[in-house]
Structure formats: C-alpha cells, structure tokens
C-alpha cells in the first residue's frame, strides 16, 4: 500500500525542528483545548498544534465525509466512526495542505494565524472515549522474566503462552492522559506470606512500558475478524503506561487475574499516530514456533520497528533513562491479537483500547518494568542523582517516549508522563 | 429508611395479576420501544409498561429534576445522572400516580390510553450504556465447589478468598439484553492435556446464575467509597447470566484470568429494580470469619433475600427447573464489593455493571452453574423430556428468574432468557 502522505521526501512549509516526532509524515490525531478554545480535534506538525475544527469551518475539508460535530468534540470517536477510508482521506488532505509548494492555506495569513497554535499553549486531553480496554501479554521476554522470577526458570512460559496471545480485560474508567498525576494506591497486601494481609499503601508501585492501539467499529457480536482484515479495524497507536502495584497483584491475582493492582490508573500519550503513518516502519516479527493455529496465521510484515524508552525523574532532579526497548520485540502482533480477541464472536467497538502488554527486549537494559529492571528488587537501579530504585518512589515522574525512524524520517509519539504522588490519607 | 412507595399495604388502581413480579411496590426502570414508539424510558406495573416519556410530556413529573432527554433516551444513563435523590423522587411520584384513590392520571382516559402499553406489545432493550463491567466471585459455596473440583478438596478456597471480595474486569461490549440469542463460541481448547490445543466450537458452554447492580456516578479517580456510603452509589439490580465456555476457560485462564471464555456474551434482564424497592427484603448475611479488614466492615443488614431459579428449555419442549438459589447466600455483599473496588482509588461511573459472581447455595440443587450441577459433567442432569445435560446444548434456552417476597408483597425481576444457537461456521 502506498500512502502519498508517507513519502519520505515530503517537506512542509511549516517549520519542523530537527528530531521532531511530528514531521509532515506523521500528522497524528488528538484532542486539545486552550484558554480561548473549547476541546476539539487537532493534529500536530513540529511544535504546532493544528486546529482541525477551524480548518473544517474554513472550508479546507470539502468533499470529505465529515461534519462539524466530528471536529467539535471532546473525543476522536465521532471522527473514527468514519472508518479507515474517512480518516485516511482526512490525513492525506491535511498532508496536501501542509506540503511545500501547496499554497491554499499558506497564503492566507488570517487562516494560518487561526489554525496553528504553539504546542506550549494547549492542553492535551484524553483523546478517546474508551469503550472496553483489553490488555495483552505479548512480549515473550517479559513473560519469560516473570515466569523465571515467580515460577520455574526452566519452565518460565506457561503451557498456553506460545499458542494464545494471552489477554485480559482492564478498566476503561481509570485510563488517563499524559500529564495527569496519580496517587500511590492503597490496597490489601500480605508482606509476610505466613501472616494475615493488611490494608496499606502499595510498597511496590511499578510502570509497564506498553503501546496501545485504538479500534474502529468492528463487526456485530458473533462475528470474527481475521488477521487479513484486522488492519481495517485499527485506527492508530499510542504509548501506554500500565501502572501496576506488584504487592497488591501478588495477593489478589489468583485465580481471576489482576484487578486492583492495575485499575487505579493507566496513562496514555495524547497523540494517536495512525497505522497509516507507521506503514513505512513495518518489519518481520519474531519467528513463531510452534506453528500457530490457522486463525492466527498471517501474511506479510505485521511488526513495527518503534524505538521505546523509559526515563525516571525524581522531584527537582534530572531524569535518568532506565530502559530502551522496541515494539518489534512483541511475539504476538496486533493482527493476531484482534483475530484472537474476536474468534469467539466477541465484538469490538469504535474507541476500544488494546494494550500490548509490557514490552521487554532480550537484554536487561531493555526490560519494560521496574519489576524486571530491578529483578523484583534484588538489583536496585542507580539514578543519575545517586539514589537507588527498586520500584517507583513518591514524587517520581515516569516518562515513556517512542519513535520510528527510516530514510531520515522520524515518526514519533511524543511522550506519556505521569507523576506518582504520595498515597492519600 | 422509610420509603412511602414500599408500603406493603399500598394498592394500585391498575390491575396487577396475582404473583406478578411488578406490583406498585416495585416500579422498576427499563428501556422499551414498540412498532409505533421510539426507544424510551419505561416502568412497569402488572402486565403494563408505563411510558415515562409520555408521563413527562403530559406534565406528571413537574417539580422533579428531569428533562425531556432523560426519558427520550435509548439508555437509563441520563436519568441515573440525577443520582439517588432524583430517581427516588421519580419512583415515589410514580407510585403516587398509580396509588388507589389517587385520580390525577386515572380519570384522564386519553392519558391512560397513551401511557399504558401491554407488555406483549413492547420490545425491551438493553437498559444501560455500560461503562465498565466488573464481575465478582462472591459466593463461598461456588468458590468452594470450583476449588474442590479443580484443586484441593481440603483447601478448596484460595488463601485470599476470605479476605478479598475477589473480582475481575469483564467485557461491556458483549452484554446483551434478555431475548437476544447467542451462538456457541469458538476458541482454543485442549481436549487432551498432553496434546496440542485445537480451534473448536466450545464443548462445555455453561451459564452462571448471577445478579448485577448498576451504579450512579462515583467519586473522582483517587478517592474511595466506604461501605457506609456505598448505597448512595447503587441504582438498582438485575438478573445476570454470565455465559461461560469452560473448556476455553481451562486452557486460557492462567495467569491473567478468564477472557474469551466469558466475553462472547453476558445476558441481563431488562428491568432494573431499584435498591429502594428491595429495601424491605434486607436480611443478615453469612457470618464473616476471619474478621474482615477495616475498610470492609459494615453496619446493618446488607444482604437481600431474593429467590432465584434457573430453568433449561430444550427446543419445542417444556422447561425444567434445574436450580433454586438465593441472593442471600452471597458471602460478600454489594457494599463490600464497592468499597473494595475503590479502595485503591479506582473510579466508578454512571452505568457501570457489577456482577455478583455465580450464586450457589449449600445444597446440590442450588448450584448456580452446569459445571457444579453436573459436577463437571460427571453427574448429568435429567430434564423433563428425558434427555440428559452435562452442559448447555445447541438450541437450549436458559431462563433465570428472581423475586423477593415478604408481607404478601412480591417484588421481582421478571426473567433473563437467551437461547444458545449452534456455532457459526
């Protein structure tokens, strides 16, 4: 598939700083507001947010299948209801308007003044009204690390892991956008396994480096989505921090899975980078052995080369990068996840969020959680300020960043950041 | 708390058949439509559905905090946004209008003709736009049965069970209303534990007899709801069939819990019976030993005496009642479930659904699932037509019913019924 808007030689008449995540080849979607402007749909180029509602009002989206309400909205859901073709055509149009040599918008100073807003003047909001949120567990390295730590190092992967893109349902209500701080959760923990549990602030708050994808409307209940069809149902991706309280999790998760250990908060980056924009960064995924069942087979490249990193920033001190990973390490790809999720007839809806699960790579500096990086606290990390970390401390900020790069084009996600405030009393 | 609308001596000028679930003391809320009328909010008395949108338009709800859109809606969410006081006042007003001796509505024949619609002329719709759906696991008898079958009969309950109202997140998108049939799900199963898994239609489709409750808006993310406050956040209850595919569940559920084994469908009854209407049926719950942690302690009667039953009806044959249980058997009550769910700061929203978990009683005829009734298939049930069942067969209809009864007043839920159609090919 060729998408004009992805051409690596494209340049824009809008200035894009070097190493920006947001060249003309990206053009993600998000929701922003300013002191003057109500919440609405925006895109981004360089350090400018593009007010798509204004572009619509000014007539730049003629002959596209959108209405005012699709842009004058607190979520992207209405826009996403137009499906892959609609959003693709919109991004292509936007690319055309911003392309060097294209003057429709550029020559109209008043329009330019109205449409472009410096990114430091906007507040980004949660971009999607999330219907259901599913979290997968699709990094073999992560599952192996967890299995090694808590079960049997010689049989670290559970018997179903290589057959099933294991997943479980999470909580939509507590998904928050980058910049929203959270409180250390309280809950039942059992510090000494032979004694009774206690109510306590969690002593083992962790992040999980994940990516998420957002779906278009799916099929009716009872129907399945094949791997071949799957990309027609994926709008785009974001960075995702699946906050976890390991001590709450340990006590609660058998037999029905994680619950309060996860649902106190999950943070997502504000810009949804379309699957279209990620097209140039497809690569082969890990070899799958044993051979997967028929409904999980796929053709072509379904993995993406997206460089990821996590930084930890104590209060008033510079950040330390503590993890460098890559989305390409995922054993199960998004097409397989969707095919599995719907093989039983489960329906997906516009605005569902699917998390990848922690994305760990093969080396210890690529592990995607404190649990793994500090090997359940046995090997504390030393930060630039000399302090040590086994898990996240009060007032630490966790920052995740990600971008893909090829042919001198860098398409990125910006960041998801969130500070862990002390527990409420 | 005294609620006028619950007075057992109340009678209505509307005829209510003997043994109806819907006397004037009930007045539940639901969403209905007819061939002539668009989807809207209704209540029910006897065999009549009450068109609340029409009552609003006709001016019977003056001085109540409602607008047209609260009744002219495909879901109850807008109505529930008014909170406990709003919906209580509405139910009280409705009770007043229907009370024998009260003639405002009764004497206006045109209004009566417009407002009351025979129940066989309406289609009931899913009453709530469900934000998040959580399922608990709160019947000690059920957890003990499952533990006995699959783990250790001498240590059937897991260590956390008597400390935590164990719960997990379910899927909102596939919650359907009574009357919607489902297809047997397909998925990965492993019929022989030493061999590779296969893709197959589930061979062990089961129901789970549950009740659900629907929440009002909760508190902001980071805050908790105490057991004392909990009932201010509960709108009402319904019957709930948490369809399950046991063979899919067995293969997938370790370590993150049930996923595709559950999310192919969950069926709920269409009428939400308010917690107010259930007030007279409060009783003491089971003694909790060991003593629960502070945040799970509560005052007063938090259990409800609600008789439940499940019937199985093969195609073209009369139904057989296969289970008689009671909501009062629940070890953990709804107040404890809500307090636990929010102790970590997890937020709940208007329209969330909380399932009780399978409600099994102490005797084998009170077990709330086929898994338990047939003891994982070892003791097939014999139906009235002479056929046997280990699990649910194609074209079987599962029907759940429930009602509370005291002082000659019967407040019921009607039923939730759904037929299991063969797997799609």
Image (cartoon, coloured by chain):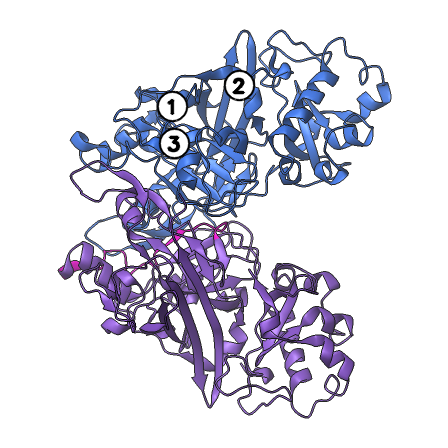
Chain colours: A blue, B purple
- The quadrant in which the N terminus of chain A is found is top right
Determine the residue located farthest toward the front in the rendered image: B316
The disc placed on residue B332 is none
Same subunit, labels 2 and 1: the answer reads: yes
State the SS at label 2.
helix
Magenta region, mostly helix, strand or loop?
loop
Q: What residue sits 24% from the left and 59% below the top?
A: B146
Q: Nearer the viewer, residue A79 or B275?
A: A79
Q: As displayed, is residue A197 above or below residue A179?
A: below
Q: CA distance from mark 2 to mark 1?
A: 41 Å
Of mark 3 and mark 2, the one earlier in the sequence is: 2
Q: Is residue A254 in sight in this rendering? A: no
Question: In which quarter of the view is residue A156 placed?
Answer: top left
Query: Mark 1 — residue?
Result: A386
Q: What residue sits 48% from the left and 73% below the top?
A: B413
Count the numbered circles shown: 3
The location of residue B198, given as percent across then percent down, is 27, 38
Of mark 1 and mark 3, the one earlier in the sequence is: 3
Residue B253 in magenta stretch: no
Q: CA distance from mark 1 to mark 3?
A: 27 Å
Query: Mark 3 — residue?
Result: A358
Q: What residue sits 38% from the left and 23% below the top?
A: A386
State the SS at label 3.
loop
Q: Chain of mark 1?
A: A
State the SS at label 1.
loop
């Amino acid at each position: 598939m060729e998408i004009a808007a992805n051409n690596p030689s494209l340049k824009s008449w809008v200035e894009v700083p070097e190493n920006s995540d947001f060249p003309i080849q990206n053009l993600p979607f998000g929701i922003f507001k300013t002191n003057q402007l109500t919440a609405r749909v925006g895109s981004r180029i360089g350090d400018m947010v593009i007010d798509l509602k204004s572009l619509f009002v000014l007539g730049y989206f003629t002959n596209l299948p959108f209405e005012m309400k699709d842009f004058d909205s607190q979520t992207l859901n209405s826009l996403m209801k137009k499906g892959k073709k609609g959003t693709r055509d919109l991004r292509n149009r936007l690319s055309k308007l911003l392309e060097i040599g294209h003057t429709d918008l550029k020559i109209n100073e008043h329009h330019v003044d109205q449409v472009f807003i410096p990114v430091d003047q906007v507040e980004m909001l949660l971009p999607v009204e999330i219907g259901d949120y599913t979290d997968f567990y699709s990094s073999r390295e992560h599952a192996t690390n967890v299995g090694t730590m808590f079960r049997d190092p010689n049989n670290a992967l559970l018997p179903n892991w290589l057959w099933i893109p294991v997943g479980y349902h999470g909580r939509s209500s507590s998904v928050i956008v980058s910049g929203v701080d959270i409180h250390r959760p309280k809950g039942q923990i059992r510090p000494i396994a032979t004694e009774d549990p206690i109510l306590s602030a969690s002593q083992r708050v962790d992040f999980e480096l994940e990516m998420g994808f957002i779906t278009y409307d799916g099929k009716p209940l009872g129907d399945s989505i094949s791997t071949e069809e799957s990309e027609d149902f994926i709008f785009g991706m974001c960075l995702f921090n699946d906050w976890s309280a390991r001590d709450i999790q340990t006590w609660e998760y058998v037999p029905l899975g994680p619950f309060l250990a996860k649902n106190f908060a999950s943070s997502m980056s504000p810009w949804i980078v379309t699957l279209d924009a990620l097209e140039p960064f497809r690569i082969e995924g890990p070899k799958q052995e044993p051979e997967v069942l028929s409904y999980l087979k796929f053709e072509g490249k379904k993995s993406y080369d997206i460089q990821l990193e996590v930084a930890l920033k104590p209060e008033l001190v510079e950040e330390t990068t503590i993890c460098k990973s890559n989305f390409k390490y995922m054993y199960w790809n998004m097409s397989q996840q969707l095919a599995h999720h719907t093989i039983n007839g489960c329906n997906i809806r516009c605005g569902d969020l699917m998390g990848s699960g922690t994305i760990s790579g093969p080396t210890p500096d690529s592990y995607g959680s404190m649990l793994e990086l500090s090997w359940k606290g046995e090997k504390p990390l030393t930060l630039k300020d000399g302090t040590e970390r086994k898990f996240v401390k009060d007032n630490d900020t966790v920052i995740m960043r990600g971008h893909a790069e090829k042919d001198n084009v860098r398409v990125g996600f910006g960041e998801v950041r969130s500070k862990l405030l002390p527990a409420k009393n």
